[in-house]
Structures are given as C-alpha cells and as structure tokens.
Image (cartoon, rainbow, N blue to C red):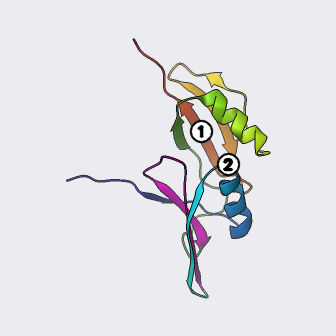
C-alpha cells in the first residue's frame, strides 16, 4: 500500500495576501472554496509537484508563520533563486551545503521554505 503526502496545511494571517504570494512564485491556484462562513479552503500546487499546500480559514490551529522546514526540490537552485528574486521575494543566495545546493525564503507570515537542487553523483 502506498502512503502519499499530498496536502500540507500552511497557517497564514491573510489568505488573499498568501494566495497572491504563492501564485507570484509559480504555484498553481487549484481550488478556492468557502463552504461555510467558518471555512475557506485554498489549495495551491508548485509546478510539477505531487503535493499541494492549503491555506485558509478553519484549516489548521497552527500559528501563522510557525512552519519551518518545508522543502521543494528543483533541477536548478540558481534558477529558482532568480525566479524568487524576480518575483520580489527575499531569498538567500544559493549555497552548497554538501547534500545539495540550497536557497531559502519565507512567505509573508514567516513560514520558512528550503529549495534544494540535489547533488549530482557520478
């Protein structure tokens, strides 16, 4: 039996601001639905990913900005860094940490992300 992680909740203070942020860096806005006054569910997916994030109201009890260690893997950390900076995101310059090249950024609430280019082994 496969156990797949397909959705991760990211706590935010302003749903529309967060949605704008994530779509500005290339995430696809898959779904935005308000089934009741207490719930608004917004699903966003990074390009090529089998796992999405969700933001909204009534989604998680976690404090906005409390997520650390979310990680995406890309073919080129440098290209990812350049795309983030072009979108106005404060990302760290690419650094080699020995197990890959990384750039780091945070969303407007302070949820922290890592972007990794896997090492190339011969």
From the viewer's side, name the closer residue of 59 and 120. Answer: 120
Residue linked to disc 1 = 114
Residue 62 screen position, x and y as percent: 58, 64
Residue ranking furthest to the bottom: 37
The quadrant of the image that shows the C terminus is top left
Q: Which residues are magenta?
A: 38-56
Q: Residue at x 29, y 53 (%)?
A: 3
Residue 97 screen position, x and y as percent: 57, 22
Residue ranking furthest to the top: 122
Q: Main secondary structure of the magenta part?
A: strand
Inspect the magenta stretch and tell me whether residue 3 lies in it: no
Q: Residue 77's image quarter?
A: top right
Residues tagged 2 and 1 counted as in contact (Cβ below 8 A): no
* Image position of 122 with respect to 26: above or below: above
Q: What element does badge 2 sit on?
A: loop
Q: What element does badge 1 sit on?
A: strand
Does residue 112 appear in this view? yes
* Image position of 99 with respect to 63: above or below: above
Q: Residue at x 76, y 45 (%)?
A: 87
Residue 16 screen position, x and y as percent: 71, 68
Residue 99 horizontal side relative to residue 111, left or right: left
Residue linked to disc 2 = 25
Q: Nearer the viewer, mark 2 or mark 1?
A: 2
From the viewer's side, name the closer residue of 62 and 57. Answer: 57
Inspect the magenta stretch and tell me whether residue 45 lies in it: yes
């Amino acid at each position: 039996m496969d156990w797949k992680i397909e959705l991760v909740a990211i706590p935010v203070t302003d749903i529309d601001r967060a949605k704008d942020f994530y779509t500005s860096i290339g995430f696809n806005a898959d779904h935005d639905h308000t089934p009741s006054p207490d719930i608004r569910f917004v699903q966003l997916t990074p390009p090529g990913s089998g796992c999405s994030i969700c933001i909204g109201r009534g989604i998680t009890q976690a404090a906005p900005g409390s997520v650390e260690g979310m990680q995406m893997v890309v073919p080129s950390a440098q290209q990812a860094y350049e795309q983030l900076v072009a979108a106005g995101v404060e990302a760290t310059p690419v650094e080699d940490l020995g197990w890959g090249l990384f750039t780091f950024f945070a969303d407007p609430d302070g949820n922290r992300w890592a972007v990794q280019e896997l090492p190339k082994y011969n």
